[in-house]
Image: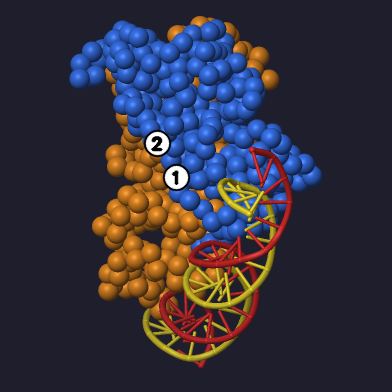
Chain colours: A orange, B blue, C red, D yellow
Amino acid sequence: MKNALKTNLPISNTVFAIDCVVFGFEEGELKTLLIERTEEPYRGCWTLPGYLVVDQGESIDEAANRVLCKLTGLTNAYLEQVYTYTNIDRYAESRVISVVYYAMIRLDGILDSQHIASYTRNAALVPVNELPELGFDHASILERVLKKVRRKVLYYPIAFELLPEKFTLTQLQSLYEAILGRKVDKRNFRKKIMSHQILMDLNEKQKDVSYRAAKLFKLDKKKHAQVVEHEFSFSEYETSI
Amino acid sequence: MKNALKTNLPISNTVFAIDCVVFGFEEGELKTLLIERTEEPYRGCWTLPGYLVVDQGESIDEAANRVLCKLTGLTNAYLEQVYTYTNIDRYAESRVISVVYYAMIRLDGILDSQHIASYTRNAALVPVNELPELGFDHASILERVLKKVRRKVLYYPIAFELLPEKFTLTQLQSLYEAILGRKVDKRNFRKKIMSHQILMDLNEKQKDVSYRAAKLFKLDKKKHAQVVEHEFSFSEYETSI
DNA sequence: TCAAAAGTGTTTTACCTACACCCATGA
DNA sequence: TCATGGGTGTAGGTAAAACACTTTTGA
């Protein structure tokens, strides 16, 4: 019973933490970074990576970036705050207030599962469809974050943050399918994506594939910025009601 | 310069606060509760209501409810957490971390502007289109909350939280117009709303109006619960991409 | 020549949009 | 009888959905 150890300390003794849901896309699957605990409580369980925030004068956003860097070595990944959990009794010694972020990281030739796993102790990138049982209330945290991301990819181009700089339309579609958890029609998907005009045709093709090579695209940064600025509909109507 | 007084205390000396954006709908306008400051800094400026969280063992959600009750006397209003601000130097003595909530309150015959204004010192319900200059970073907080609410009313039935239990379709439309900041077509609006089948026809009419009385509706709680459960599209396509 | 994935159009359907008049009521 | 808001339907356009075959390439 995880509430058994709760102590009602004054809130000024409360400890801050960052919990970070780190998403990556690999082998056609949406994966998230989990840490295997080596201490009680929940020893042997997997949890989201979380760190206490103790630095002087560090804002929570800075702390989240520091945590992400510690986990992955990345300093420029997409990072967004989602929610602040206050009912978590993570440690017996004091109440912990967790600010939850999610990060989107690019897994490519340079950074991949094995790299991540070796970078942080007891870490693994686990497909979100094959999650083990999670410690603390991390299952519900992850559920909330997934819900948010699944909605957001429909109107905001955050999915691209998971792809390498150059990608094919099939890879992009496969990513959307992994995030949304359902198949989408290839022709309709391509029409829709191309209609937004945020992709730049690189006039390059895949190499080292044993089938017809696909064209490579990259995000058109300028167009992308306009989309972000106006937050116009990426795939849903905005004009209703 | 509001950063001038910043002190880099260890984060364990950080103070928690709740900032609460309280929305109400009155006279065809979306209004929000503001407090006029009587102390430096920002003396004479208006700000969002905010309170320190100091109670032992109180979660932030409970604290937000307590704050709302203190402000309005309401205990069951719709309340949702939006964002946690960490860069606010509200007080000189220590860093303040603000968890921002928004609340939707029902202004009707019982509770109205004057009631609210008399309930809390120096408080006023101000139309969001006629905001005074706000102290601290409250203008940007309010902007974020408004953006969130404007998006959310399109797919989630939160707007109803601002109406009295019985309402007319014109009142509902007027509310949507106030929130979205634009006019909508009466016939299209009615078709759309009725198609969701979350309204219950009360077979009652307005009284005390000097024109043709409109039918009264209320939210169908059962249908509403289904909408909330499945979060199906209230007005936008969900099926794209 | 085969396997594997790339790439491409059309038709149907559903929804959104624009638009204007008559009705009921109380003053 | 008039002023005020209540209430209603249709047609046209646009976007989504459904659907299958040909092309390219390397093995």
Label 1 Cα crowd, 10 Å radius (few <14 / some 14-19 / many 20+):
some
Residue at point 62% right, 35% down?
B163
User: In the figure, residue B206 lies in which quadrant?
Assistant: top right
Residue A78 percent across, percent down from the top left: 36, 44
Q: Amino acid at mark 1?
A: Gly
Q: Quadrant of the N terminus of chain B?
A: top left
- Disc 1: host chain: B
* Residue B95 in sight here: no
Query: How far is the residue under mark 1 from the one under mark 2?
Result: 9 Å
Label 2 Cα crowd, 10 Å radius (few <14 / some 14-19 / many 20+):
few
User: In the figure, residue C13 lies in which quadrant?
Assistant: bottom right
Q: Residues at badges 1 and 2 in contact (C-beta under 8 Å)?
A: yes
Which residue is identified by label 2? B129
User: In the figure, residue B165 lies in which quadrant?
Assistant: top right
Q: Is residue B43 above or below residue C5?
A: above
| Residue closest to the eye, B95 or A24 | B95
Residue A14 percent across, percent down from the top left: 47, 13
Residue A188 percent across, percent down from the top left: 50, 71
Q: Is residue B164 above or below residue A178?
A: above
Residue B155 percent across, percent down from the top left: 57, 48
Q: Amino acid at mark 2?
A: Asn
| Residue closest to the eye, C15 or B170 | B170
Mark toward the start of the polypeptide (1 vs 2):
2
Residue lying at the far right of the rendered structure: B203
Which residue is identified by label 1? B181
